[in-house]
Amino acid sequence: MVTTNEKKWIEYNHPEIKHMDDRLLLIDADIMYYRAGFAVEEAFDFSDNKRAHTADGSDAVHLFHRLLIGVLKNLECSRFILCWSASDNFRSDLDPNYKQNRKDARRPLGGTPLKEALKKKYPSIQVPNLEADDLMGLNSGPGCIIVSDDK
């Protein structure tokens, strides 16, 4: 059931989104965060083959919002929860090599402050030791739709 506050938020921000009271979207927020964060970055190449990146955090927040609204419109649903991965993970305790191939991967600029701003702006959940896909699986059931590009 859509709460009164959820209806007010949608009606105020995006009245064109339909209200489908019987469905809840569980959205992998990590993927949207990475897409929005990297998409707004600008790269500057220097003569010594070095590169610097810059980004405006407000651009990332606006793009994240547009991506979210796109999902809500496409799935004709107004109820959602953003699922965020915790920085720690129980899988790392089981296998020290878990995601070691990503340890040197660059993260979008903005990092934790950007994520925290998004968590405060939208209905979100994050649980210590769990990833977003764990949260989506644990909270899914009849009437839930999992929104993720992850396997």
Image: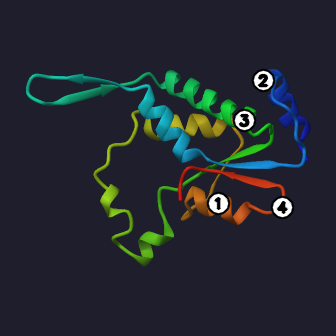
| Residue 144: percent from left, percent from top | 78, 55
- Image height of 42 relative to 132, above or below: above
Disc 4 and disc 3: Cα gap in Å?
Answer: 20 Å
Label 3: which residue? 74
Q: Hey, what amino acid is under mark 1?
A: Leu
Residue occupying image coordinates x 59% and y 59%: 133
Mark 1 — residue?
Answer: 135
Cα separation, mark 2 vs mark 3, equals 13 Å
The tag earlier along the polypeptide, 4 or 2, is 2
Residue matched to label 4: 142
Mark nearer the viewer, 2 or 1: 2
Give the left or right position of residue 45, taking residue 7 as reference.
left
Residue density around tag 1, few if under 14, some if 14–19, many if 20 or more, within 10 Å: many
- For image coordinates 47% across by 56% down, the residue present is 87
**Disc 2 packing (10 Å; few <14; some 14–19; many ≥20):** some
Q: Earlier in the sequence, mark 2 or mark 1?
A: 2
Dot 4: element: loop
Identity of the residue furthest to the bottom in this view: 94
User: Relative to residue 50, is residue 34 depicted above or below?
Assistant: below
Q: CA distance from mark 1 to mark 4?
A: 15 Å
Left or right: 107 in relation to 82: left
Q: Secondary structure at mark 3?
A: helix
Kind of residue at badge 4: Pro
**Residue 114 vs residue 78, the one in the foreground:** 78
Q: Secondary structure at mark 1?
A: helix
* Residue count near mark 4 (Cα–Cα under 10 Å), binned few <14, some 14–19, many ≥20: few
Q: Which residue is mark 2?
A: 14
Q: Earlier in the sequence, mark 1 or mark 4?
A: 1
Q: Looking at the image, which is closer to me, 51 or 146? A: 146
